Amino acid sequence: VRRARADARAAAGAARARPVLAGGVLVAAAGAAAGLLPAVALGLLAYVAGLAVIATSLWRAAWRRPPHSFATLSTGMAFVWWVGALLTLVATVLVSFWAGPGIAGVHDALDLIVPFLAAGFAAQVLIGALSYLVPVVLGGGPTPVRIGTTAFDRAGPWRVATANVALLVCALPVSSLMRVVASLLYFVAMVSFLPIMLTAMRAQSRAKK
């Protein structure tokens, strides 16, 4: 997505991370099925450790060439929300184990975490990936693709910043009015992708002709 060479150790890091990620999922799932919260926490922490291995390569690549396009910023922030949701879930599992609510406390926490996982991770990955892929799929040569990509990047940092700050405000213990305002700002920032996408596609089509 950055249109730059990947980190030299990215492939090796991904190969090392794969069994850690898979093992973490299996341990967490088995622990949840058996109602063993320490096993759930251990599996989730192993999964986070696997993500950390991958994140090392991403960080080195981003340090050499900082992300600036909307696609890289959006998918990058999605990764942050993904890890944040996992760490929040780990903390919830440990608190539920020590404080006594048990697996029921984890169920209640999931009801709060999943909306932020959908809005912070899934939605941002989707529009970030589309911002990169649509110009490539439309094609037409280097110049039309560059024109389409530039159009997709319109106000990119502001859109990403607005969406993520608004979502963070929604996650904080703020008043109902503040949460409504933040939700509207998030919605506007995310929905703005649609008219920008249509404008970018038209601009690229004209460049192809």
Image (spheres, rainbow, N blue to C red):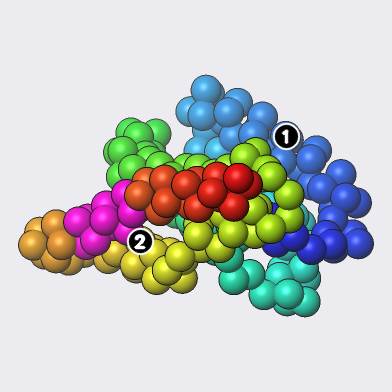
Residue 21 percent location from the top left of the image: 71, 41
In this view of the protein, which residue sits in the foreground, 24 or 153? Answer: 153
The numbered mark at residue 52 is none
What secondary structure do most residues of the magenta stretch adopt?
helix
Name which quarter of the figure residue 205 lies in. top right
Q: Residue at x 39, y 64 (%)?
A: 159
Whether 47 is among the magenta residues is no
**Which circle, 1 or 2, is nearer the viewer?**
2
| Segment colored magenta | 182-192
Residue 160 percent location from the top left of the image: 43, 64
Circle 2 SS class: helix
Q: Residue at x 86, y 44 (%)?
A: 15
Q: Residue at x 73, y 55 (%)?
A: 142
Residue 93 percent location from the top left of the image: 45, 45
Q: Which residue is mark 2?
A: 163
The numbered mark at residue 22 is 1
* Label 2 crowd bin: few (<14), some (14–19), many (20+), radius 10 Å: many
Looking at the picture, which amino acid does disc 2 mark?
A: Ala
Q: Is residue 128 left or right of residue 184?
A: right
In this view of the protein, which residue sits in the foreground, 24 or 146? Answer: 146
Residue 111 percent location from the top left of the image: 31, 38
Q: Residue at x 73, y 74 (%)?
A: 65
In primary-sequence order, the first of circles 1 and 2 is 1
Q: Is residue 163 left or right of residue 22?
A: left
